[in-house]
Every structure is written in C-alpha cells, then in structure tokens.
Amino acid sequence: MYFVANWKMYGNTADINKSKSVIKLANLKKYKVSKIIYCPPFTLLSTFCDKVKNSNIFIGAQNCHSISEYGAFTGSINAKLIKSTGAKYIILGHSENRKCGETDIIINRKIRSATKENLKVIFCIGEKLSEKRKKNTYNVLRKQLINGLKGIKKIENIIVAYEPVWSIGTGLVPKNSELIKNIGNIKKILYKFKKSKSIKILYGGSVNPKNVKELAKIKEINGFLVGGASLNPKKFIDIIKKSII
Ligand code: PGA
C-alpha cells in the first residue's frame, strides 16, 4: 500500500519535525512493506530528505517544469533539480494544476522529463463533476491516460492516482461501487494501451480516518493520495493503520 502525503502549499520546517511519529511508524516491521511518501513544497524538499535519511519514508515533489535541461526559466524548478535534493517521487497532472492551464501535452512533457531523471511519477487523473453528470467519466479518464502517457517507456516508474476533481477537499467520496468500476476501467485502458497489468492505482480525494476503512476494502486500490489530512500526523497515522489490518 502507498500512502502519499500531498502537502500542497502548506508546511514549514517545524511541520517536518511533526512527522517524527510517522517516521517511527514507517520503521515498524508491520509497515515496512508499505510505501510512505511525503510530498512537501519545493522549499522543504532537501531538509525533508535529510530528515528521513535511514528511514522507510520517501520524499516527492508536487510538480516540475516541463523542460528537462537547465535553462533561463526564472522561478522554475525542473526534474533534474528535484532529483538533486534526494527526492524520488513527483506528483504530476494534479487537477489543481490542470485548472491553472496545464494541458495533457504539458503533463506528458513533464512525465517524460521526470522519468528521464528516474523519478517515480504519481500521475493524477480524474473527472470534474460536470463530466461525471454527463456520464463522460470513462472518456475523460481514457483521454487523460492516453495523452499523458504517450511515448512513456519506463511504465514501471508510473503510479496512477485516480482523483475525481469533485471529491478533492470537499469531503465527498465516490461510492465503493463507483470506484471499483472506474478503477477497473483505468486498468483496462492501461492494459490495452501500455500492455501493463502491474501499474499501481491510488485513490485520492477527501481521504480521512473516518472513511478510509471503507475505501481500503477495495482490493483494486493500491494506496491513497492524501491532501488535507496528511498535514496532521495523527490523522495520517490513523489512515495508515486503518488501511493495513
Ligand atoms: P484532499 O486532497 O485529501 O485534501 O481532498 C487530495 C489531493 O488533492 O491530492
């Protein structure tokens, strides 16, 4: 099981220290098989990497510039720079960035540059409420997957995070039957398009200690991408404990 903490635009050095209890948990035998990944803002990547050295926790970034070489791009950070901090993962295609104009083509370029640096990509896809209402979810997911992963060879470096846009930060979570259907479709699309049966699929969107037990019953889900609740170490630990029985 993967547990990815997406800190978004939150967090300072003091918050890194609060993760002590999570580091302790991650080192326990029972949880060693699971992958706990913190994705803090860029400003904390290096410090966080130092903090988790010799532990069972990994660090990831939340986005990157699409160009893989160094260059004159004021204010930008590319996959090479992220790699140099010690981070091993990166979230790409998050709906909060798609909303700011990130297209499938840009996301595909970013995935290419991240996999070139051997970063593992947590590739976010998901339908908006209007698309769900129009019963267009399948087509939206298919388009995002095909366009985002076009030409990507190192498919073993991809983890897909299914995050319905309407469930992010809203407290709303799809019914288990809906999740099973959509994740089943994602797997079918990936098999048809990439001949891969082994890509891990995470669920993200309002995961919290109260709803995680129900979500964890879905065997097709390989873990969770957790936003709000991951900033609170107690809640994050609760989510991990309730998912692994
Ligand atoms: P949330 O965010 O858990 O706060 O809904 C999830 C995400 O955006 O990855």
Image (spheres, rainbow, N blue to C red):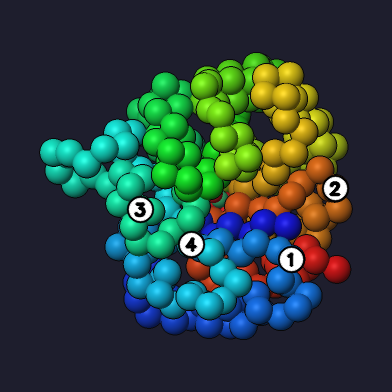
Which residue corresponds to the image point at 67% horizontal and 46% vertical from the top-left? Answer: 202
Q: Quadrant where the N terminus lies?
A: bottom right
Q: Position of residue 215 (x, y in %)?
A: 78, 52
Mark 1 vs ligand 1: CB below 8 Å: no
- Image position of 156 (left or right of 54): right
Image point (50%, 52%), residue name: 89
Circle 1 packing at 10 Å, graded few (<14), some (14-19), many (20+), is few
Earlier sequence position, callout 4 versus callout 2: 4
Q: Which residue is mark 2?
A: 219
Calculate the distance from the C-alpha at mark 4 to the C-alpha at mark 2: 25 Å
Q: Are marks 1 and 3 in contact (CB under 8 Å)?
A: no
Side of 228 relative to 214 (left or right): left
Q: In the drawing, what numbered circle is on residue 59? A: 4
Gap between marks 1 and 3, in whole Å?
25 Å
Instruction: Work out whether residue 225 can be spotted.
Output: yes
User: Residue 59's spot in the image, x, y percent?
Assistant: 48, 62
Real-space Cα separation, disc 3 to disc 2, in angstroms:
33 Å
Is label 4 in a helix, a strand or a loop? strand
Q: Earlier in the sequence, mark 4 or mark 3?
A: 4
Q: CA distance from mark 4 to mark 3?
A: 10 Å
Residue at label 1?
A: 33
Residue named by callout 3: 82
Residue behind label 3 places its C-beta within 8 angstroms of ligand 1: no
